[in-house]
Image (cartoon, rainbow, N blue to C red):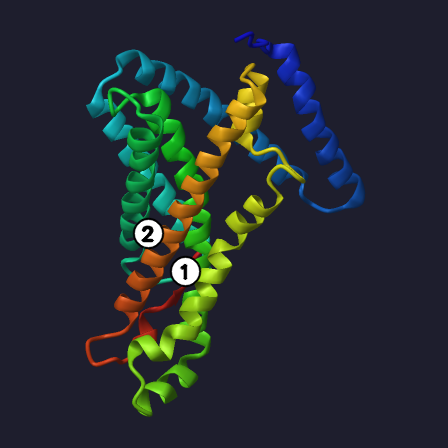
């Protein structure tokens, strides 16, 4: 494949677009220019470091290294997932970690081993990028799901406790909140799937086309990736919701809303 290499001048031209957006923010008094600049700097630094790390990982090509990197990615994704909601509870990080690790490994393993047939199973060129795609989308779904669920349990405490007092189980009293939380958690991936190929060209498909792959081959890979991400987000959000409910209701079907606390900035 004929890949067009990008140099420092090309990256500088691209950065001018961000500077233009920052200038407009400054001119309009939006106050977003510093955050935009900081985000751009972090993007360059983080992706550059990642490039060096992946170069080393691909060169080593050992299963232990891949597993360690997968663990680090899971920890970072779980931390990001619990930092976004406005509320939290003790144990939220562990629940997010379990949900991400379980669904991420399952969906990635199905794609790499069953669909693509990667050999050996730990081949980092496939495992790490695909796992990163799952985590990047799943953490958003889990964060939105947990945010709404904790908000509902906190704000609607009286209504939930009334239902429990009238004989409802924890499942029955929290069912509406759980359904709404899952709906919100799945909105981003459902929207992305709905407009794929009409409004937007998804990232993996775009990258493969730019790298010279035939469009239909890129489409096939993108469909697999989109389905993998949808499954990871759905299963991760569902597992997180069930873990939250299990934590905040005791064995006597009592809501422990006192465990919910406001998130610190």
Q: Residue at x 59, y 9 (%)?
A: 4
Front residue (pair 166, 190): 190
Query: Where residue 37 is drawn, which disc sits there?
Result: none
Quick check: can you spot residue 57? Answer: yes
Q: In this figure, which residue is indicated by the disc labeled 2?
A: 96
Between 84 and 74, the one nearer to me in the picture:
74
Nearer-N-terminus badge (2/1) = 2
Categorize mark 1 by other alpha carbons within 10 Å: few (<14), some (14-19), many (20+).
many
- Judge from the rendering whether residue 213 lies leftward or rightward of residue 106; answer left or right: right
Point out the residue furthest to the right here.
Answer: 27
Of 34 and 73, the residue lying toward us: 73
**SS under mark 2:** helix
Horizontal and vertical percent for residue 206? Answer: 58, 26
Residue 169 percent across, percent down from the top left: 29, 81
Label 2–label 1 contact, CB within 8 A: yes
- Counting labels gives 2
Q: Find the distance from the CA under tag 2 to the CA under tag 1.
A: 9 Å
Q: Quadrant of residue 73?
A: top left
Outermost residue on the front side: it is: 216
211 left or right of 65 in image: right
Q: Tell me what residue is drawn at x 40 percent, y 34 percent.
A: 132
Give the side of residue 44 with respect to residue 166, left or right: right
Callout 2: 10 Å neighbours few (<14), some, many (20+)? many
> Residue 97 at what x, y percent from top left?
29, 48
Q: Secondary structure at mark 1?
A: helix
Residue 262 versus residue 1 in the image, above or below: below
- Counting from the top left corner in percent of width and height, residue 119 is at 26, 20
Single out the residue that lies furthest toward the bottom: 166
Vertical placement of residue 45 versus 59, above or below: below
- Say which residue appears at 46% left-offset and 49% top-offset: 140
The residue pinned by badge 1 equals 146
Left or right? Give the position of 114 relative to 133.
left
């Amino acid at each position: 494949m004929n890949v067009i290499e990008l140099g420092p001048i090309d990256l500088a031209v691209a950065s001018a677009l961000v500077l233009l957006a920052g200038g407009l923010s400054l001119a309009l008094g939006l106050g977003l220019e510093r955050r935009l600049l900081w985000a751009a700097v972090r993007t360059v630094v983080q992706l550059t470091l990642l490039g060096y790390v992946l170069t080393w990982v691909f060169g080593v090509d050992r299963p232990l290294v891949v597993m360690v990197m997968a663990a680090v990615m899971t920890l970072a994704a779980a931390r990001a997932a619990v930092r976004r909601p406005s509320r939290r509870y003790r144990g939220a990080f562990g629940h997010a970690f379990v949900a991400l690790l379980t669904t991420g490994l399952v969906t990635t393993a199905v794609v790499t081993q069953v669909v693509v047939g990667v050999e050996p199973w730990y081949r980092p060129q496939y495992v790490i990028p695909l796992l990163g795609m799952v985590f990047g989308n799943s953490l958003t779904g889990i964060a939105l799901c947990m945010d709404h669920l904790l908000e509902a349990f906190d704000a609607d405490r009286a209504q939930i406790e009334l239902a429990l007092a009238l004989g409802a189980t924890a499942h029955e009293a929290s069912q509406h909140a759980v359904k709404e939380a899952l709906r919100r958690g799945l909105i981003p991936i459902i929207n992305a799937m709905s407009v794929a190929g009409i409004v937007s060209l998804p990232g993996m498909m775009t990258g493969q086309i730019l790298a010279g792959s035939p469009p239909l081959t890129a489409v096939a890979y993108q469909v697999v990736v989109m389905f993998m991400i949808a499954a990871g987000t759905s299963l991760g959000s569902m597992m997180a919701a069930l873990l939250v409910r299990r934590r905040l209701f005791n064995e006597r079907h009592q809501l422990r809303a006192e465990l919910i606390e406001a998130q610190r900035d």
